[in-house]
Amino acid sequence: MHSAQQLWEIRREIPFYAPQGDECRLFEHAHASALPLLIKGPTGCGKTRLVEHMAARLGRPLITVSCHDDLSASDLVGRFLISGGNTEWSDGPLTRAVRQGAICYLDEVVEARRDTTVVLHPLADDRRMLAIERTGEQLQAAPGFMLVISYNPGYQNLLKSLKPSTRQRFVALCMDYPNAQIEQAIIEAEAQVPPALAAQLVKLATALRRLTDHDLEETVSTRLLVVAARLVGSGLSLRQAVQAAIVDALTDDADTAAALSELVRAVCGEAT
């Protein structure tokens, strides 16, 4: 277990990440074996930071795509554009990653249109090939290329899930929020705050994550705890920081917000 100071020193060299288990080792082995990786975990648990951290450790360029409802296969692969009266092909982020041997990270891939997964299949098996239909090019992935996708299983519905034919092409890595000791060290290192404040925020998170009688789409993430800690570090009171960074970020419902605020008072007291 690294101390907060040791973690901060590590962050100076590569993006900071506090391992929860063997996920870094699994990532390294998947990359060395030219295998694609699927990362599953709740919002704000560190999926994106893990990818950033490992890309730096492996010395590979990283191209990240935040997937959304309107993201199409053409957005990933590329399209013809008119420039100076001429029609020119412009590579999309996936094609650039394949050419460069970069790590391509598709964040929340299930949010993209269903046709996007079709272009991933040849890249996610032994072919490691990207077919560019508009140009007729069959592009072989350069050495070092790695396809990484992520999603939040708890936020899925029947219309937003990966087909078995897609899932089974990937090595799967399951993540969750870190245990209390690691989460406290993360808050200390990321927000540069005293251990007592970090411990209080972790205690609050533990209580909030136990809630089962409120209709919350998401619970408090490690990311939100770091944001609250930074606000306190800048001079805002603990109550104000928690209200803005956690309570109001989790819900728009007045009754639910009031219930969360009561829990905050119970855990944190009337601290200012």
Image (cartoon, rainbow, N blue to C red):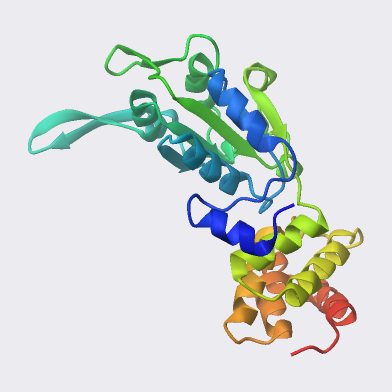
User: 35 or 90: which is nearer to us?
Assistant: 35
* Left or right of 37 on screen, residue 89: left
User: 34 or 125: which is nearer to us?
Assistant: 34
In the image, what residue occupies the spot 67% across and 79% down? Answer: 241
- Is residue 69 visible in the rendered image? The answer is no
Residue 244, percent across and down? 66, 77
Circle count? 0
* Left or right of 95 on screen, residue 135: left
As displayed, is residue 121 above or below residue 185?
above
Residue 26, percent across and down? 66, 29
Locate the C terminus by quadrant.
bottom right
Residue 143, percent across and down? 41, 19
User: 39 or 135: which is nearer to us?
Assistant: 39
- Is residue 200 visible in the rendered image? The answer is yes
As displayed, is residue 201 above or below residue 54?
below
**Where, by quadrant of the figure, is residue 50 drawn?**
top right
**Where, by quadrant of the figure, is residue 53 drawn?**
top right
As displayed, is residue 154 above or below residue 238?
above
In the rendered image, the residue lying farthest to the top is 127
In the image, what residue occupies the spot 67% across and 67% down? Answer: 188
* Left or right of 130 on screen, residue 213: right
**Where, by quadrant of the figure, is residue 198 drawn?**
bottom right
In the image, what residue occupies the spot 46% across and 32% down? Answer: 103
User: 225 or 26: which is nearer to us?
Assistant: 26
Residue 141, percent across and down? 40, 18
